[in-house]
C-alpha cells in the first residue's frame, strides 16, 4: 500500500468515525467529483464498516457546468431540478450523514467562461441544503481530497507526483493522519 493509499483509507475512516459520526443503520451521502473515486470508494468502505445501511454517491462534474454556461439559454441557467432539493430534504428526514469531498480537480475549467453566466448556475449548491444545515438533521463533514490538479496549484514548481505527495503529507499532518490513531488524536484535541 502506498502512502497516499494509506492516507486515503485513514482520511475516510476519520471522516466517517469522527467528522460525520456515522452510526449503525444510518444512510450516508457522499458528494464527489470525477477524479476523486479512490476517496469516495474509501469513504463507502469505511461507512459500511461502521454499520451504514446504505451509501449513496452523487457526482458533480464541473465540465457539465461549463457546457451549460457556454451553450444553454441564459434564462435557464437558474433552473434547478426539484428532485435535487428533494433529495437533500429526504436525507434530513432520514437523519443521514453527509460527507463532501473538497479540493479542485479541474481548477481552470471555467477560466474562459463569462463569470456572469457562471453565477447564474448555483449548482451543485441547492437552497434546501441550508434548511437541512439549520435544522441540524444530518451529521456532515467536508473532507480534503488531494488531487494532482490541486497539488499543482499549491506547488507549481514541483513535478506533479512530488507535488501530490507533498500536499498529502501536509494535509495528513494538519488532519492528524500522521498520528498512530488519528481519531484518538482528535478526541484528545477536542477535550483540550
Image (cartoon, rainbow, N blue to C red):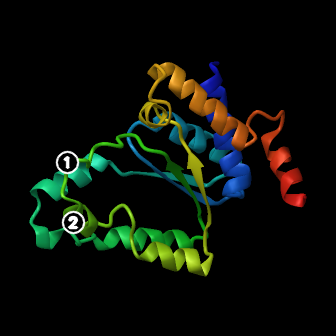
**Residue 186 at x, y = what percent?**
81, 50
- Disc number placed over residue 30 in the picture, else none: none
Q: Depth check: give the residue in front, 51 or 129.
A: 129
User: On the rendered image, what quadrant is the N terminus found in?
Assistant: top right
- Residue 32 in the figure: left or right of residue 50: left
Q: Is mark 2 on a helix, strand or loop?
A: helix
- Residue 153 in the figure: left or right of residue 107: right
- Disc number placed over residue 112 in the picture, else none: 1
Q: Which residue is rendered at x = 30% and y = 42% of the image?
A: 108
Check disc 2: other Cα within 10 Å, few if <14, some if 14-19, many if 20+.
Answer: few
**Image quadrant of residue 156?**
top left
Say if 35 sits above or below 110 in the image: above
Q: Depth check: give the residue in front, 27 or 165.
A: 165
**Image quadrant of residue 124?**
bottom left
Q: Which residue is rendered at x = 84% and y = 45% of the image?
A: 185
| Residue 188 shows in the view | yes
**Residue 89 at x, y = what percent?**
47, 74
Say if 140 sits above or below 170 in the image: below
Q: Which residue is rendered at x = 50% and y = 49% of the image?
A: 102
**Residue 3 at x, y = what percent?**
65, 23
Q: Residue pushed farthest front?
A: 157
Q: Which residue is rendered at x = 50% and y = 80% of the image?
A: 131
User: On the rendered image, what quadrant is the C terminus found in?
Assistant: bottom right
Separation (CA) of disc 1 from disc 2: 12 Å
Q: Depth check: give the residue in front, 171 or 96.
A: 171
| Residue 89 shows in the view | no
Q: What element carries label 1?
A: loop
Check disc 1: other Cα within 10 Å, few if <14, some if 14-19, many if 20+.
Answer: few
**Image quadrant of residue 26?**
bottom right
The residue under label 2 is 116
**Residue 82 at x, y = what percent?**
31, 74
- Residue 56 in the figure: left or right of residue 79: right
Amino acid at each position: 500500500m502506498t502512502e497516499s493509499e494509506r492516507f486515503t483509507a485513514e482520511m475516510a475512516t476519520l471522516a466517517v468515525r469522527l467528522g460525520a459520526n456515522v452510526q449503525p443503520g444510518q444512510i450516508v451521502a457522499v458528494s464527489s467529483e470525477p477524479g476523486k473515486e479512490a476517496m469516495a470508494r474509501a469513504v463507502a468502505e469505511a461507512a459500511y464498516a461502521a454499520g451504514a445501511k446504505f451509501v449513496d454517491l452523487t457526482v458533480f462534474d464541473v465540465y457539465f457546468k461549463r457546457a451549460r454556461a457556454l451553450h444553454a439559454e441564459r434564462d435557464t441557467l437558474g433552473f434547478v431540478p426539484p428532485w435535487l432539493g428533494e433529495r437533500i430534504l429526504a436525507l434530513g428526514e432520514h437523519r443521514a450523514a453527509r460527507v463532501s469531498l473538497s479540493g479542485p480537480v479541474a481548477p481552470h475549467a471555467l477560466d474562459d467562461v463569462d463569470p456572469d453566466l457562471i453565477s447564474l448556475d448555483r449548482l451543485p449548491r441547492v437552497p434546501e441544503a441550508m434548511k437541512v444545515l439549520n435544522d441540524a438533521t444530518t451529521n456532515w463533514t467536508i473532507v480534503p481530497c488531494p488531487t494532482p490538479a490541486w497539488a499543482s496549484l499549491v506547488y507549481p514548481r514541483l513535478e506533479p507526483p512530488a507535488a501530490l505527495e507533498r500536499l498529502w503529507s501536509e494535509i495528513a499532518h494538519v488532519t492528524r493522519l500522521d498520528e498512530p490513531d488519528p481519531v484518538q488524536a482528535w478526541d484528545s484535541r477536542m477535550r483540550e
